[in-house]
Image (spheres, rainbow, N blue to C red):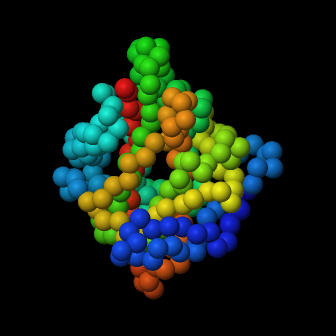
Amino acid sequence: MAQPIESLIIQADRPDAEPEAIEATLNYIVDDGTPVFTETEVADFFDEAELQRVYYPEMEALVKAQSGATRVVVFDHTLRTADDAAREARKIREVVSRVHNDYTEWSGPQRVRDLLPDEADDLLRRRFAIIQVWRPIRYPVETFPLAICDALTLSPENLVVSERRYPDRIGQTYAITYSPDHVWYWFPHMRREEALVFKTYESLEDGRARWTAHTAFHDPTAMPGARPRESIEIRALAFF
């Protein structure tokens, strides 16, 4: 069950141009023991062939540059919108307004086994990560921006396994329980040429960040008539 937390302070990454902090509501899960199921050259983000041909190589290069990985494999993407009519017309997904992380201790390595079965045993002996790149696809984000939790403020006790059941496999994500220690950041009015790059799985357990809790949220400073957010996220395996 998702629980809204009122008056949570979220800090802006652009304090020179935006309020230094706002009060907004983020939706966490209440862990009651119940199982949980739950600038680019691209001209047209709705063209699947163009995404595969142009965007995927762009994102592989970006993730390599930001992470230092020696090999990057982009394996999927998701388009989202806060516009109900556009979502139905284009058959794309809604924004995710609950605090979560896309992979778990089990499902991170399992994704490598699913995607690269012939190489998995060798690859899993070395460090790897799953990295996500998130960006708006048309105009600046005016509604439902993405908030990112400071990984240093996230505790293992906040992580609740949530199963995702598909016709051919079972996946897992982490739902996140509330903690007053969490520190959140958001990037107001992100533009098409800007992107967020963050880890949703890290194999090393040496004290570095392993997960990135994140969520879309209702921005109380949005102007009347603000345009619904449209975004794309890609997921990539990064090997070191």
Q: Up-down: is 201 above or below 186?
A: above
The residue lying toward the viewer, choosing from 226 and 14, is 14
- Looking at the figure, which quarter contains the N terminus? bottom right
104 with respect to 177 (left or right): left
On the image, the x and y values in percent for residue 178 come to 69, 56
Percent across and percent down for residue 83 are 45, 69
Front in this rendered view, residue 138 or 22: 22
Left or right: 205 with respect to 14?
Answer: right
Q: Residue at x 69, y 52 (%)?
A: 177
Q: Residue at x 37, y 26 (%)?
A: 240
Picture residue at 50% right of the left edge, 56% below the top: 148
- The answer to whether residue 223 is seen in the rendering is yes
The number of callouts visible is 0
Specify the quadrant of the image occupied by residue 70: top left
Residue 77 rendering spot, x and y as whole percentages:
39, 45
**Residue 226, placed above or below residue 63:** below
Measured from the top left, where is residue 34 in percent x and y? 79, 46
